[in-house]
Amino acid sequence: MTAHAKDLKGTRYALWKNPERLTERQEAKLSWIAKVNIKLYRAYLLKEQLREVFSVKGVKALVMRWHLCFDALWPKRQSRGIDFS
């Protein structure tokens, strides 16, 4: 197993947990992932977007889902900075 794979081994729970329930160590792991493994971090962000989209109801949810689909079609472009709160 490579050194990078060993470092990633302990990140599973940080990637699974809701962001508001992360420990300091898990937050540090996510920060490290964002720097060294862009694809994994993008997958984590997509998981969080999906979690938020499917927790919202009504018209706001439809708009959020449309934006999520639009982002999936053009994954390399920059975020538009849309805030759904």
Image (spheres, rainbow, N blue to C red):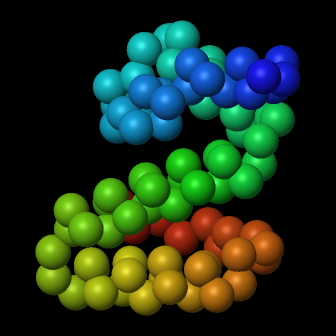
The answer to whether residue 74 is left or right of residue 43 is right
Residue 32, position as x, y percentages in the image: 72, 26
- Image-based side of 81 in relation to 48, left or right: right
Q: Is residue 58 above or below residue 36?
A: below
Q: Nearer the viewer, residue 5 or 13?
A: 5
Residue sitting nearer the eye, 63 or 21: 21
Residue lying farthest left? Answer: 57
* Residue sitting at x 77%, y 41%: 37
Q: Quadrant of the N terminus?
A: top right
Residue 38 horizontal/vertical position (percent): 77, 48
Total marks shown come to: 0
Q: Is residue 3 above or below residue 8?
A: above
Q: Is residue 29 left or right of residue 69?
A: right
Compare residues 81 and 31 and report the one nearer the observer. Answer: 31
Q: Position of residue 73 (x, y in %)?
A: 64, 87
Vertical side of 15 occupied by 84: above or below: below
Can residue 31 be spotted in the picture?
A: no
Does 15 sit above or below residue 74? Answer: above
Residue farthest to the front? 1
User: Picture quarter containing residue 77?
Assistant: bottom right
Q: Residue at x 65, y 73 (%)?
A: 80
Specify whether residue 13 is in view: yes
**Percent coordinates x, y for residue 12 in the rendering:** 49, 30
- The residue depicted at 67 percent of the width and 26 percent of the height is 8
Quarter of the picture containing the C terminus is bottom left
Name the residue rendered at 61%, 66% in the picture: 81
